[in-house]
């Protein structure tokens, strides 16, 4: 099955984010996360590394079930 409009290589996960880099690594300072942050795991967000909801389109188009990693602070 081929999903997505921009197919480069069927084995790739990332066909969009910073393709000119050998490895995409992002750093987020935990102090910058106030209560909660959702990080993209579908590699299609326009607000990388954060989730922008694009996984919904991907899941519909590809019959997939991916979603974000949500990091939240414990309630005190
Ligand atoms: Fe990629 Fe939500 S946009 S997981």
Image (cartoon, helix red, strand yellow):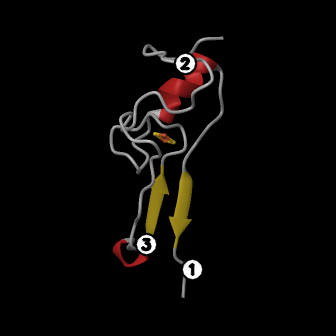
The structure residue drawn at horizontal position 33% and vertical position 37%, both measured from the top left corner, is 46
Q: Reading the chain from its start, which is encountered first: label 1 or label 3?
A: 3
Residues at marks 1 and 3, CA–CA distance in whole angstroms: 9 Å
In this rendering, would 14 be left or right of 26?
A: right
Given the current orientation, which residue lies at the most extreme bottom position? 76
- Please say if 67 is above or below 9: below
Q: Nearer the viewer, residue 35 or 33?
A: 33
Residues at marks 3 and 2, CA–CA distance in whole angstroms: 37 Å
x then y, percent, for residue 66 = 62, 37
The residue at which mark 2 appears reads as 9
x then y, percent, for residue 10 = 60, 18
The residue at which mark 1 appears reads as 74
Dividing the image into 4 quarters, which one contains the C terminus?
A: bottom right
Q: Secondary structure at mark 2?
A: loop
The residue at which mark 3 appears reads as 35
Circle 3 residues within 10 Å: few <14, some 14–19, many ≥20: few
Q: Nearer the viewer, mark 1 or mark 2?
A: 2
Q: Reading the chain from its start, which is encountered first: label 3 or label 2?
A: 2
In this rendering, would 14 be left or right of 62?
A: left
x then y, percent, for residue 47 = 33, 44
Circle 1 residues within 10 Å: few <14, some 14–19, many ≥20: few
Task: Please identify the quarter of the rendering in which residue 65 is found.
Answer: top right
Total numbered labels: 3
Dividing the image into 4 quarters, which one contains the N terminus?
A: top right
The structure residue drawn at horizontal position 38% and vertical position 73%, both measured from the top left corner, is 34
Residues at marks 1 and 2, CA–CA distance in whole angstroms: 40 Å
Q: Which mark is residue 34?
A: none
x then y, percent, for residue 26 = 42, 57
Task: Please identify the quarter of the rendering in which residue 74 is found.
Answer: bottom right
Q: Secondary structure at mark 1?
A: loop
């Amino acid at each position: 099955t081929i999903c997505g409009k921009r197919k480069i290589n069927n084995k790739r996960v990332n066909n969009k984010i910073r393709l000119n880099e050998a490895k995409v690594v992002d750093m987020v300072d935990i102090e910058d996360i106030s209560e909660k942050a959702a990080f993209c795991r579908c590699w299609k967000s326009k607000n990388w590394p954060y989730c922008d909801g694009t996984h919904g389109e991907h899941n519909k188009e590809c019959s997939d079930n991916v979603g974000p990693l949500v990091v939240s602070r414990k309630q005190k």
